[in-house]
Amino acid sequence: MVTADPYTVKLEIFEGPLDLLLHLIKRNQVEIYDIPIATITDQYLDYLNMMRTLNLDVAGEFLLMAATLLQIKSKMLLPSRPEEEEEEEDPRAELVNRLLEYQKYKEAAARLHERDILDRDIFVHGNQVEGSEDRGLVEIGVFELIEALRDVLNRFSPEAAYDITLDRITIEERIAQILEAVKLEGRGLLFSSLFSGASSKEDIIITFLALLELIRMRMIKVYQRVPFGPIEILALSAG
């Protein structure tokens, strides 16, 4: 937990529990219609623990979904009688329907967003086409970022880091540093480079929270040039 600079980011600003479930389904390469509920539940709970470690303000819907998953998991563990197998509804059915409806909503919203970008692209400023630099960039969500951060934390070696006992950097100071570094880079700053000089896991978490705050303020965007490629950070125009 971050103790030197207590700071929380409200996760509901970014994505909700259905987004997390869709992310886990995609990551596990399974069908929505046949969710391996035990595996998904365990991974979902791992994410919740990770979010608490990061001082993320987990909304009540996340906890409610955790209870729902545990309930479905317990129902599926109960043995069913042969005569009830055909009549009994799959305990996952309601959740599957919710996920399918939400997925349709997200896809529709994504199409509208793409159309909006295409509409903006017809306006030429000088020799550049507005939005053309965004083509081919795939924006990623907070859960992909949490996974990337987990990799950073797993690779972090306390033995190789200096034990700095001076005043810790504040979130506000780190926000300013990240924004300056992203603007200086211009073409896209590597996510991993933000943590190269970290002296402790606490510093890593402060950096991550500062990154989320910049995303919330729409001052940067985080993306990949190719699926599963390096994560990069790009400054957004103030105007």
Image (spheres, rainbow, N blue to C red):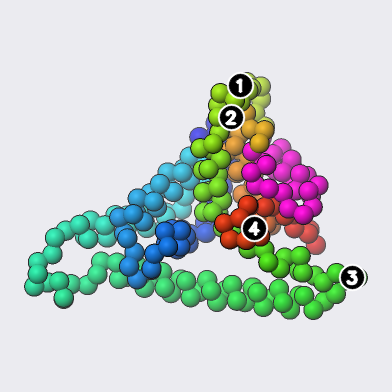
Q: In the rendered view of the protein, which quadrant contains the C terminus? A: bottom right
Assess whether mark 2 and mark 4 are in contact (beta carbons under 8 angstroms). no
Q: What residue is shown with label 3?
A: 127
How far apart, in angstroms, are the residues tagged by discs 2 and 1? 8 Å
Q: What residue is shown with label 2?
A: 200
Amino acid type, residue under disc 1 in the picture: Asp
Q: What residue is shown with label 1?
A: 163
Amino acid type, residue under disc 3 in the picture: Asn
Which numbered disc, 3 or 2, marks the residue closer to the eye? 3
Sequence-first tag of 1 and 4: 1
Query: Viewer-proximal residue, 11 or 44?
Result: 44
How far apart, in angstroms, are the residues tagged by discs 4 and 2? 26 Å
Say above or below: 90 vs 36: below
Q: Is residue 17 visible?
A: no
Q: Could you tell me which secondary element the residue under label 1 belongs to?
A: loop
Residue at image position (51%, 37%) is: 154
Assess whether mark 3 and mark 4 are in contact (beta carbons under 8 angstroms). no
Q: Which residues are magenta?
A: 170-195
Residue at image position (69%, 52%) is: 233
Sequence-first tag of 3 and 2: 3
Assess whether mark 1 and mark 2 are in contact (beta carbons under 8 angstroms). yes
Return the x and y of residue 7 as percentages of the image width and height.
58, 40
